[in-house]
Amino acid sequence: MAFKFTDKYLKSFISDSDLKSVGGEVDSAVKTLEQRTGRGSDFLGWVDLPVDYDKAEFSRIKAAAQKIRKSCDVFVVIGIGGSYLGARAAIEFVLGQNHNALKGDSPEIYFVGNDISSSHLRDVLEICDGKDVCVNVISKSGTTTEPAIAFRIFRDLLVKKYGDGAKDRIFATTDKARGALRSQADALGYETFVIPDDVGGRYSVLTAVGLLPIAVAGIDIDEMMAGAAAARTELSGGDVLSNPCYRYAAIRNILYRRGKRVEILVANDPALTLTCEWWKQLFGESEGKEGKGLYPSSAVYSTDLHSMGQFIQQGERVMFETYIDVNVSDGFTIPYDEENSDGLNFLAGKEINFVNQKAFEGTVMAHTDGDVPNCVVDLSSRSPRDFGYLVYFFEKAVAVSGYMLGINPFDQPGVEAYKKNMFALLDKPGYAEEKKKLEARISEIG
């Protein structure tokens, strides 16, 4: 396995005795998770998902992916939050940010329904013009505002273009038995896939939610599940000193209690930009409640060292970094230049990855000297198996860490607040009184 977690750069911040001091809390959190006795225990389907999943549906996902790959030029994925981030993260992790331009025999894949931007929707509609299109709409209820708006628009596009044949180009990932999207899919004959009742959105990338778009991109989902299964086995048992997942959860809580209130997930490859975004939702929704929790931020180096680097090096000392070091040697070297006008001939013949690694080492040492603790996830490849392993590592770590905080890592009650206000201001039936109150407050503000 190309995955390795190390805290060797933390020695001046956290000792083994510090870790042992919270060992009992870690053991208790792990026991709560494994025995399913804590809050949110009805959303633990992800724990055994890598080995205990619906094999028949998994085969249908692969068959549908092949059908889509053969029948369309553009595949539009409609979803928000956990119904969007995991799939896009996986595709870019394995294939890179430019996968649509380098698509080979795969359709171009675009994601909509994750915002309420008319320009974003218009751009993707323009891309679809004159091309064969398939759509995957992902929603437990079918009524979430952002994806519901997008689905209306793209469903109309398909109906106008294909008539009755539109139903064969729409794939719905939704609740197994209820909800507006389930009813519509059953009535109109869309092929459907199930969002499990016991897997929350931010933990759903290894369900049909993520697997169908990932498979359409041509990525081996068997290998991805195998990576997650390996993590499930290797990250079980042991204690805070021997299990890297438990060690990471302990490190986060120790640093949090010492005033490090912000965790920055750093990647040194732009292909992991959306992995960082997926991680922010996973950790933000899981831990940010009851006035508690680390604030999850992210950065991509060396790019962000030229923008946020100054603050990270010398700003307020409230942060630490978890660095994903992608160390992939691919033979891409820097050429020699006779003129040497840029003064870079000292790098001629060296791999670009070698330079990236030295930038990583230099950055970690500089930030450590600047009182920014660093722990590191080493990756020597960006394979589907690596992504599956990484996903499971972070999912289990945040579950243990959340129970150590004393909160429910599997709900997100605060997400509903903005929706209620938005529905009221949009004059949704049943929100008349709330609308009056909000408009009065807005008027007072001026």
Image: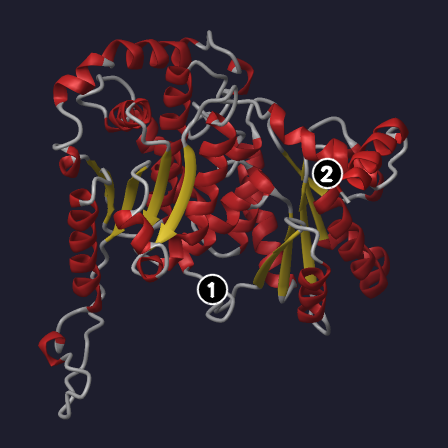
Q: Looking at the rendered structure, which numbered label has been put on residue 22?
A: none
Residue 388 occupies quadrant:
top left
Q: Nearer the viewer, residue 282 or 137?
A: 282
| Residue 160, percent from left and from top | 85, 63
Looking at the rendered image, the disc whose residue lies closer to the viewer, 1 or 2, is: 2
Dot 1 surroundings within 10 Å: few (below 14), some, or many (20 or more)? some
Q: Looking at the rendered structure, which numbered label has been put on residue 99?
A: 1
Q: As drawn, is 358 to the left or to the right of 170?
A: left
The N terminus sits in image quarter? top left
Q: Give the residue drawn at x 23%, y 13%.
A: 23
Q: Give the residue drawn at x 28%, y 25%.
A: 258
What residue type is disc 1 on?
His
Q: Give the residue drawn at x 16%, y 63%.
A: 354
| Residue 32, percent from left and from top | 40, 10
Dot 2 surroundings within 10 Å: few (below 14), some, or many (20 or more)? some
What residue type is disc 2 on?
Thr
Compared with residue 243, is residue 225 higher up or lower down, i.e. above or below?
Answer: below
Q: Which residue is disc 2 drawn over?
A: 144
Q: As drawn, is 372 to the left or to the right of 423?
A: left
Q: What element carries label 1?
A: loop
Q: Nearer the viewer, residue 195 or 123?
A: 123
Q: Give the residue drawn at x 90%, y 32%.
A: 429
Q: Which of 121 and 180 is in front in this view?
A: 121
Figure disc tally = 2
Compared with residue 284, is residue 218 higher up or lower down, i.e. above or below?
Answer: below
Residue 349 occupies quadrant:
bottom left
Q: As drawn, is 76 to the left or to the right of 328?
A: right
**Label whose residue precedes the other's in the sequence (1 or 2):** 1
Measure how far apart labels 1 and 2 are at the Cα level. Answer: 28 Å
Q: Is mark 2 on a helix, strand or loop?
A: loop
